Image: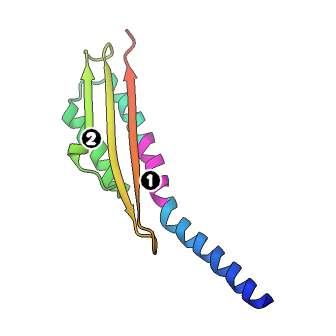
Amino acid sequence: MRSLKTILILAVIGFVVYVGWLVIPPYFANYQFEDTVKTEALNATYTTRTEDDIRDSVFKKAKDLEIPVTKDQIKVHRVGGQGTGSIAINVDYTVHVEVPGYPLDLQFHCTSTNKGLY
């Protein structure tokens, strides 16, 4: 009976480690992506780059991180001029994780807003 309990505990621990192996990478990639979006919003506030250029830059980083996002899902909104306006970048996406017996759809909402000096 004792060996059965040990095997059961090891199986549960193994399953938890396996689920963590599947679920943690999308969260880590989202953390890196959020950092990129914040940096992009900060830098883009003080440049003359167009909304499409900013969108392309964010999309390129998403592809580098293997985040399943399309250019249509990246919303860039600029108000005002260089250094005096504000910029907002919003990205909503879903990552599907195939956990045995319980498939997951992880929803991520990445948002950053930066205002100019004036």
Residue lying farthest to the front in this orientation: 1
How many other residues sit within 10 Å of disc 2, few (<14), some (14-19) or many (≥20)?
A: many
Q: Mark 2 points at which residue?
A: 74
Q: What element carries label 1?
A: helix
The residues colored magenta run 25-35
Residue under the point 39% across and 12% down: 117
Residue under the point 42% across and 34% down: 38
Q: Name the residue under label 1.
A: 29
Residue type at the position of mark 2: Ile
Q: Quadrant of the N terminus?
A: bottom right
Q: In the rendered image, which quarter is residue 90 located in?
A: top left
Tag shown at residue 42 = none
Q: In the rendered image, which quarter is residue 2 located in?
A: bottom right
**On screen, 92 above or below 49?**
below
Residue under the point 37% across and 16% down: 116
What is the basis of the colouring in this image? rainbow
In the rendering, at what x and y percent does residue 74 appear? Answer: 27, 41
Q: What element carries label 2?
A: strand
> Is 72 within the magenta?
no
